[in-house]
Amino acid sequence: MKFLYSDEPIIASSTCNHANAALAVIRISGFKHLSQFLTFFSHSGPIEPRRVYYTKFISGSEVLDDICLTYFEGPKSYNGENILELSIHGNTLNTERILKFFIEHAGCRLAAPGEFTYRALKNKKLTLSQVEGLDLFLNANSGYALDQGLSLLSGNLQEIYSELYDLFLKHKSALELSIDFIDDVGEATAKGYFDSSLENFKNKFETLHRRVIPMEHNLLQPELVIAGLPNSGKSSLFNFILRDERAIVSSIAGTTRDYLSETLVIEGVKYKLIDTAGIRDASDVIEAEGIKRTKQKMQHSFFSILLVNPFEMREEFMELSQLKFDVVYFTHADLPGFDAAKNSVLKIYPQFGSIGAISLTKNIHHFEKELTDSINIKYLSVTKDKPILLDRHKSLISQVSSQLIIYEKLVTYETDVAILSSELNILASCLSELLGIVSPDQILNSIFSNFCIGK
Ligand SMILES: Nc1nc2c(ncn2[C@@H]2O[C@H](COP(=O)(O)OP(=O)(O)OP(=O)(O)O)[C@@H](O)[C@H]2O)c(=O)[nH]1
Ligand SMILES: [Mg+2]
């Protein structure tokens, strides 16, 4: 990442640049003295930090805009650098003109995505977890993810990591005590200190590890999958829920050949509702690929809805019945003979029997409420224990867990403290990464690549 090594003044619009708005905020960071910009403003007196000044933005004798400016003097600023924030009129042309002006006349360059925040990390105004929290917060698609992002941003998880790291250091010093000061403190005291410090570390770690719940689905972008055999009514249901003729519906089996997805908001959570290709033994290559994707989607979905048209009983039901699903609905309930058809399916596949029948003409509102309630209940139940959502954290916590198991085993029989110490160093490196004490470039790259320009 090129910007990692540069500290020249940067500029960006921190608000949406793609549409006109009442206001836009331009942020300039990393300049030496505010005086270098003062000729661009009509304001003549001194400018105190953290106060808002209403002034004209000028170029020579020409007034370009009426703006408000606020100066944040480093290190008491978002990223520790001198920062100037300008609230300007939010016409996109105006924003572009002012950005260009600063680039051409004030030695600024356009900031890379996340560069303001990267400097906050570099200047130790934010920890790596806080940066990730900010990323989560800014990209959250539910109130829950917003809360988690905010909690990370406020440093809650970092605090736990620091406490854990302190306990680790206590244990490490207990081991060193056994190496260097055994004659001074005595073997029994050293052993007692060693055991209790390891126990304390383990207990603290276990509470953290419990939050790393193995999840096949992605809670940050939960997917709701509608699956079933061809002609079971998947696209009809998809369209109905979206109140839009989004997917093609027809009586020709195999109409949907690849999955389609649209956003659906339930109780403040943004889900991806997915219509899939009907599962069957397809000879067509494209359809077969679509079916493979359907199965993958079902496997990794947050919630899967299986639709069964009982009038089309086919051998593929066997395969369907073995897939993972949260609810099963029988469609075509409006047609005569529905009950008999449904019962004959249930006789062979009783596992489909737990749930109701839907018809797109009858009781649909009742059904829809029942469906969205069960999705919401599942969402609340998975999120109630505050699982750790970020993959980097999950993976490092799992690494610490495996390393701790190895270390604990070693402790039971290994008497050579030098060997124990080298094993403990491996644990130390995972913990340091978790804490953000060491952050390999590729981690920084992957975190900051998510950020928008201006943050
Ligand atoms: N009578 C009745 N017809 C339905 C019902 N649901 C869907 N249909 C009809 O069944 C046919 C197939 O519906 P689709 O929604 O295209 O089915 P699909 O599961 O998406 O089918 P594929 O895309 O081929 O996998 C269409 O003619 C729909 O109008 C229902 O509950 N009752
Ligand atoms: Mg379809």
Image: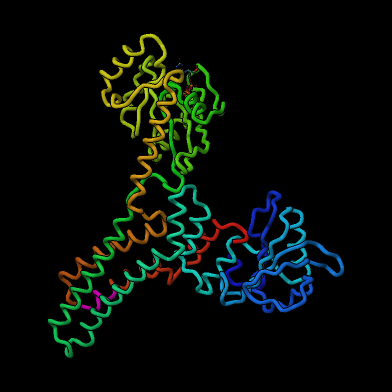
Which quarter of the figure has residue 74? bottom right
In the picture, measured across the screen, residue 227 lies left or right of residue 263, that is left
The vertical placement of 381 against 63, above or below, is above
The vertical placement of 131 against 32, above or below, is above
- Give how far across and how far down residue 406 sits, in percent: 24, 64
Q: Is residue 419 located in the magenta-colored stretch of the structure?
A: yes
- Give how far across and how far down residue 266 sits, in percent: 46, 39
Residue lying farthest to the top in this orientation: 336
In the picture, measured across the screen, residue 112 lies left or right of residue 201, that is right
Which quarter of the figure has residue 398? bottom left
Which corner quadrant holds the N terminus?
bottom right
Q: Of residues 198 and 255, which is closer to you in this image? A: 198
Tell me what residue is drawn at x 24 percent, y 75 percent. Answer: 419
Residue lying farthest to the right in this orientation: 61
- Give how far across and how far down residue 83 sits, in percent: 63, 71
In the picture, measured across the screen, residue 183 lies left or right of residue 337, that is left
Q: How many marks?
A: 0
Tell me what residue is drawn at x 57 percent, y 72 percent. Answer: 77
The vertical placement of 172 against 348, above or below, is below
Residue bounds of the magenta highlight: 417-422
Residue lying farthest to the bottom in this orientation: 184
Q: Is residue 339 located in the magenta-colored stretch of the structure?
A: no
Which corner quadrant holds the C terminus?
bottom right
Tell me what residue is drawn at x 54 percent, y 28 percent. Answer: 243
